[in-house]
Amino acid sequence: MYSEDDLIPLSAMQHLIFCERQCALIHIEQAWAENLFTAEGKIMHERVHEADRESRGKVRIEYSMWLLAHCGLG
């Protein structure tokens, strides 16, 4: 299979698409500063970082899903 070092969070891919520098600062250099908006967002999205899943009718919801990407981040 793949080692933990080969995996990146989906949020890293989102940051990479939005801004490569932002992605590097957050995911490689671990440079992050909370503010009012990021703190609110963190609270609202807390559940998505828990490894879990649920079903609602025919819809399956996955939380904290890791993907393999070959883009030089991992």
Image (tube, grey):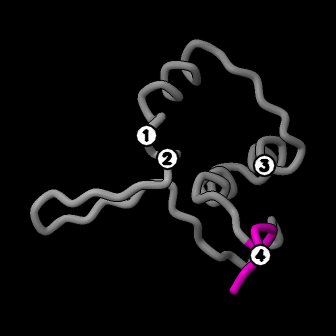
Tell me what residue is drawn at x 65 percent, y 50 percent: 15
| Cα–Cα gap, marks 4 and 1 | 24 Å
Mark 2 lies on residue: 50
Q: What separation in Å lies between label 2 and label 4 (alpha carbons)?
A: 20 Å
Mark 3 or mark 2, earlier in chain: 3
Left or right of residue 55: residue 8? right
Q: Which mark is residue 3?
A: 4
For the residue marked with disc 2, what is the amino acid? Glu
In the rendered image, the quadrant that contains the C terminus is bottom right
Q: Amino acid at mark 3?
A: His
Residue 42 at what x, y percent from top left?
53, 28
- Foreground residue among 42 and 53: 53
Label pair 1/2, CB-CB below 8 angstroms: yes
Task: Count every numbered label the image shows and give the total.
Answer: 4
Number of the label disc, if any, that sits on residue 27:
3
* Mark 2 or 4, nearer chain start: 4
Tell me which amino acid carries mark 4: Ser
Residue 42 drawn above or below residue 52 = above
Q: Label 1 vs label 2: CA separation? A: 5 Å
Q: Toward the viewer: 29 or 61?
A: 61
Q: On the image, which quarter does residue 58 sit in?
A: bottom left
